[in-house]
Image: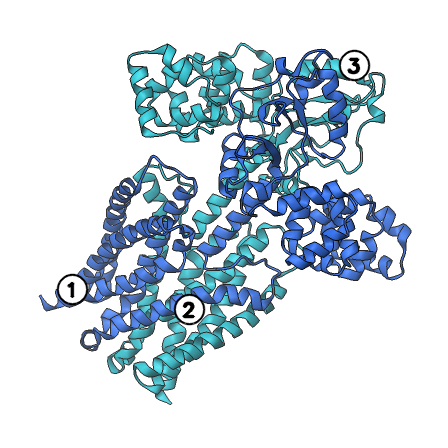
Chain colours: A cyan, B blue
Amino acid sequence: MRFELNKEFLEEIRDAIHIENKEWIETHILDLHFADIAEILGELNNTESKFIYYLMNEGLQADVLMELEEEVRDRFLKSLSSKEFAEQLENLDSDDAADILGELSENEIQEVISHMEDDEAADDIVDLLNYDEDTAGGLMQKELIKARIDWPVDRCLVELRRQAEDVEKVYTIYVVDENNRLVGLLSLKSLLFAKPKTKIVDLYQHKNIISVKTGDSFDEVARVMEKYDLDSVPVVDFQNKLVGRITFDDVMDIIKEEADKDFQMATGISEKVESNSSVWKISRARLPWILIGMLGGILGAQVISGFEDNISKIPALAFFIPLITATGGNVGVQSSSIVVQFLARGNAINNLKNRLIKEFLLSLFNGVICSSIILGIAVLFKNITLAIVVSTSLFVVIVFAGMIGTIIPFVLNKYKIDPALATGPFITTLNDVLGLFIYFTVGMILYQM
Amino acid sequence: MRFELNKEFLEEIRDAIHIENKEWIETHILDLHFADIAEILGELNNTESKFIYYLMNEGLQADVLMELEEEVRDRFLKSLSSKEFAEQLENLDSDDAADILGELSENEIQEVISHMEDDEAADDIVDLLNYDEDTAGGLMQKELIKARIDWPVDRCLVELRRQAEDVEKVYTIYVVDENNRLVGLLSLKSLLFAKPKTKIVDLYQHKNIISVKTGDSFDEVARVMEKYDLDSVPVVDFQNKLVGRITFDDVMDIIKEEADKDFQMATGISEKVESNSSVWKISRARLPWILIGMLGGILGAQVISGFEDNISKIPALAFFIPLITATGGNVGVQSSSIVVQFLARGNAINNLKNRLIKEFLLSLFNGVICSSIILGIAVLFKNITLAIVVSTSLFVVIVFAGMIGTIIPFVLNKYKIDPALATGPFITTLNDVLGLFIYFTVGMILYQM
């Protein structure tokens, strides 16, 4: 039976808090999984949350705190004093503590750090704050289990027991030399079944050790962990010294976030929003694309106004404006989205020329099908000339839109701009304007013939 | 130093294969990480791949086989005889073997299974084939490590050593009672530091054990593993008997795939394609949306033709057609994408009414901003009446488009249709047609006043 939060239970919880029924909360809430408790706190206000929070022990507090959604956590932490804040940080893993501190101002960080009593934990956090938050260094945690290559198994077990207190999930034991350089890996499994006097050097795995450098980007870390199916990856500095590790759950969160961001960008939302973000924040994230689209519309109006005489004479030309713009937009978005995913995978052997040739063949094919269909339908509509104008220009628009949709993401990528941006505003707007120009030019030529 | 595949190295490999230089391949290829070898095989043809493949030992063959991209793997396996195929299957984890077999016809499956020599492995695979491939049962592997609750630690270690031969990554030990019912978990860490005579019952964790049922959907499994940050989750049947486990790497693959699918759907690609898919396959995946868009364009033409007289009299009305359709489309796609992500998270407490109210406020706000801007610009363009027509209808279109974008995904979701479909064709087409209707109706009314 997995936990499901519903309105009735939430009401019961609120009632228990308001009459300060600690016993009820201990039996009904504190025994739940920390992820479920976090879900509950997410629905309560700060005062209510605090009441439950301070009934928990330190370990549970830390787990729950890190499971809270970011907005809820920030709101909650802001309601604490610096001293209370510092106490909470000491319970967290170093990477989590650094992430939270990283969002404060320099002064606030100093204030909170000064209240921390565990100097070693404080040092770890301060050290992590030095790394750019978009890199492996910013993502890693200091807590890990390592063994010296010259230890025997029994010595190793004694040391590991000490280290393991700070490390919730072990995954892999990192093997280092006397200078703390990463030289290999050791699985818990192999250690479990080894004889006490066996040396680590005879047990450990030293071939194809995958590690990341502190300066490697998020994307690179995610790509490496995915490619090699790693549950955790060691982080080393320029001298190959072991400085931290990154576990799969952190990477999974990032992959999800990036996917959400790409999806939102492709649908015209310029800033990461949650469904529970404020109207103001969502509005701010959505306005840019609407405005760029409007700019395209105004440029389009400019193009059409250049052909005002033609429209006065043949008003039916106006009928097919939406057909042209919609198809150009659709084809452009489709072709760019394939290129964006292609670039995101970091594929290097294939290239722009090959993609352009492929897209060209595709556009020819789709263009012939679509313009044949529209030729048939447009004939029914008005006259033969109009039908030829619409189908010819549709064909040209499909080919052009496909080419533009393929080129733009490559160009953005070259200038280090996220190519996902292309699947949104750029392509659609550009293709709208270009499509209209093609349509009316073809119309003008064919009607004059 | 991580491996990077480049054209020069690929040429060297091809040369070595063609002169059958086994020694070169053993030194330069077989010592690489299996994920890198898989990357190399992905670039070679079947004959070339086979040459390398049969130089590897069984364990490496299995690892490489599962790392190949699906298209490459299918192509490769199809080139094997049933007997060779069966030999390869025996090396794989049960879930991987079942996945591969599941894509064959009944007859082919029987043929391959009949060639398998390891009966236990064959039984496991046949058993897994019974589960729907979109469920936890279809995703799980049979290989896991379990301990009986009444065992002491030393007995447990002996049993585990035997079980561990089949299990590459251990993660968690599942604790079961005498009827194989899941009763708790045991970490390798706790076992490593326990005394030999301690009973498992005194060591194991029995509170908040998260498991999934064989019939649970992919989405549910992914949601649970993400929510509870699990590296692996046990799978139980209706009697709570332990039947398998699912590890994070399988789920990570699915999350990525679903995200890719959603992204493609939002950008108008109706069928999962890879950037290296054939022109024919990509074309087939892209045509439906282009055609739906064209249908919208034709309906739009129908709407505009109803106002032909107005356009003859005031050709400038046609100028702003692209502005209206582009903005309606953009707003609709934006609002639907937020609802789609909201629904994908399985959020239950919030609902349609709340979202509609929020979207309404948002639309009012964005509508006022956009129509004020356009009022200013349109005034410069032509005449005051036209400016009022454009800005009034733009406002109405923004509000309607936002509402439609919010409602459609909820409706699709209710009828068990993937709401992500809504961010593509439906919304854009509907909003195009509706937007034109609003625009020309407002135009007609205001010009007659």
Mark 3 nearby-residue class (10 Å; few <14, some 14–19, many ≥20)? some
Callouts 2 and 3 on one subunit: no
Residue type at mark 2 is Leu
Q: Name the residue that disc number 3 marks.
A: A155
| Label 1 vs 2, first from the N-terminus | 2
Callouts 1 and 2 on one subunit: yes
Q: Is residue B76 left or right of residue A406?
A: right
Q: Is residue A406 above or below residue A205?
A: below
Q: Residue B266 placed where, x, y %?
A: 44, 54
Q: Is residue B15 above or below residue A71?
A: below
**Real-space CA distance between mark 1 and mark 2, rounded to the nearest whole angstrom:** 36 Å
The residue sitting at 39% across, 42% down in the picture is: B342
Q: Name the residue that disc number 2 marks.
A: B291
**Quarter of the rendering occupied by the N terminus of chain B:** top right
Nearest to viewer (mark 1 / mark 2): 2
Q: Name the residue that disc number 1 marks.
A: B385
Residue B2 seen in the figure: no
- Quadrant assignment, res A305: bottom left
